[in-house]
Amino acid sequence: MRKFLVILDDSRECLNAMRFAAMRAEKTKGGVTILSVIPPDEFNHWIGVGDLMREEARERIHAHYEVFAKWMRDRHDVDPELVIREGDVVSEILDQVRADDAIGVLVLGAASGKKGPGPLVSQLSRSSGSLPIPVTIVPGELSKERLEDIT
């Protein structure tokens, strides 16, 4: 089964990437892997404080994931899997793609503001020619209706 890899973060455009991945997975009988990466610089504190912050970050990720997972199950009959990694976001995305042969497409949400599409889209699009899978960039401003038409 081919899986769509989508990145869970705090950006607004993440929502449309999730929607797109779920809709495509439903229509193609595929799966969805939701990846969340915890940057290492969040825990550069004393060991006990860093461990507590790491655990709180994981709890936030699980809570955020459950909202998307419930929606995917209820609306699209897709049961996503959650992967949490720690490290540099781009490196961890590439490592996850290499670790899971079933991942066939990376789905990213692009911001529409004056600042550009976002750091993740910018970084990954620069190296997209050497990625082992295609990248789908979903505009953050697309309506749900337009996403349904496209998928």
Image (cartoon, grey):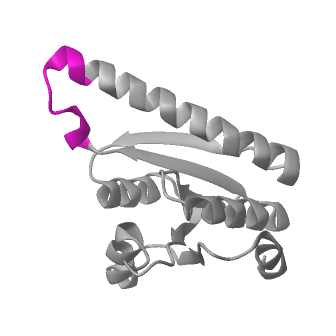
Q: Quadrant of the N terminus?
A: bottom right
Q: Quadrant of the C terminus?
A: bottom right
| Residue 54 horizontal/vertical position (percent) | 33, 27
Q: How many marks?
A: 0
The magenta span reads: 40-50
Q: Is residue 11 magenta?
A: no
Q: Which residue is at the front of the view, 129 or 71?
A: 71
Residue at image x 56%, y 65%? 13
| Residue 48 horizontal/vertical position (percent) | 21, 14
Residue 13 appears left or right of 77: left
Residue 92 appears left or right of 11: left
* Displayed quadrant of residue 41: top left
Q: Is residue 49 magenta?
A: yes
Residue at image x 29%, y 45%? 39
Residue at image x 79%, y 79%? 146
- In the displayed structure, 62 sits above or below 26; it is above
Residue at image x 46%, y 77%? 113
* Displayed quadrant of residue 23: bottom right
Q: Which residue is at the front of the view, 103 or 86?
A: 86
* Displayed quadrant of residue 84: top left
- In the displayed structure, 3 sits above or below 144; it is above
Residue closest to the far bottom: 129
| Residue 63 horizontal/vertical position (percent) | 59, 32
Q: Is residue 56 visible?
A: yes
Residue closest to the far top: 48
Q: Which residue is at the front of the view, 143 or 104?
A: 143
Q: Is residue 2 visible?
A: no
- In the displayed structure, 51 sits above or below 11; it is above
Kindly report the secondary structure that dominates the magenta region of the rendered protein: helix
| Residue 3 horizontal/vertical position (percent) | 64, 59
